[in-house]
Amino acid sequence: AELQAELQARKEQYEYYRNLLLTFNPSACGCGTDGEQKITDVTNWGGHSYEITWKAMGEIGKFIRGNGLQKKDFIDSGVGCIHYGQIYTHYGTFATDTKSFVSPEFAKKLRKAHYGDLIIATTSENVEDVGKAVAWLGKEEIAISGDSFIYTHSQNPKYIAYQLQTYRFLQYKRMNVSGTKVTRIDEKSLSKYIIPIPPIELQGKIVAILDRFETLVNDLTTGLPAEIAAVKEQYEYYRNKLLTFKALSA
């Protein structure tokens, strides 16, 4: 119980600092609604002032819908691909390799993501997972399934991916998704979502800090369950030892 509580505390700590680092002046933009572009200054980064521009995602990038790829099309090797369901079940904030592949012939029919693009899931069973993004940082182009968008842009890809993990974006999704059993978010809603855009230099500094936090949490997520399992096995061993008695011979 203590180990599980420790893991949960670390996750909550990470989420708190992630939201803090990615929030500059939430009142300046109306929290993801249409409105006049606002600019504010940030002065708490090494004594430097940075100009922050609030822009809609549709202003700084382009959405391209994936097509045609289904799980039945997977093969053992070939052209890398990402199915929309894998974005929230397998991948983290970024990826350099794919879990799945399709044949080169079939890949020719599919839309491709390139280095720096984001792959965004547009369909899920819940609000938390829909709209999740993974930044593609692999050298090769990869194929993308339907129910996902390729988002091309000129910003730091991890910075944009982290922005789509914030509590603010979760609030925005709750107001803009559709469906009950299947939750969806469309291009129009994503295009209107307004995010703070600092200079690329500051984006890189923020990403470096968040990367360290995410690595720590992932290490805990991997290591603590193994430790919990070991403690359980140890408990069961001693429980069986204490409750096992040798029968007296007649």
Image: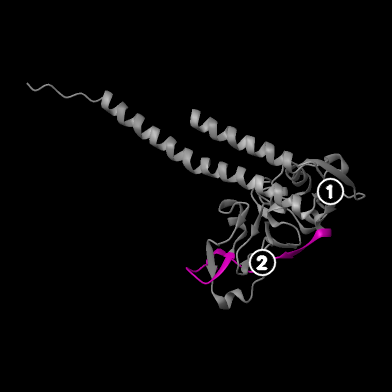
On the picture, is 4 further left or further right than 243? Answer: right
> What residue did someone put label 2 on?
113
Q: Which residues are magenta?
A: 59-81
Question: The disc labelled 2 sits on which kind of residue?
Answer: Ala
Is residue 67 a member of the stretch shown in magenta?
yes
> Does residue 242 appear to the left or right of 30 in the view shown?
left
Secondary structure beneath dot 1 equals: strand
| N-term-proximal mark, 1 vs 2 | 1
Where is residue 33 shown, x and y percent of the image? 86, 47
Taking the spot 76% from the left edge, 56% from the top edge, the residue there is 186
Which one is nearer the viewer's eye here, 152 or 170? 152
Residue that appears at 85% across and 50% down: 54
Determine which of the numbered discs, if any, sits on residue 191 in the image.
Answer: none
- Res 29 visible: no
The residue wearing badge 1 is 52
Residue 56: x, y in percent? 83, 54
The single residue placed furthest to the right in the displayed view is 36
Which tag is nearer the camera, tag 1 or tag 2?
1
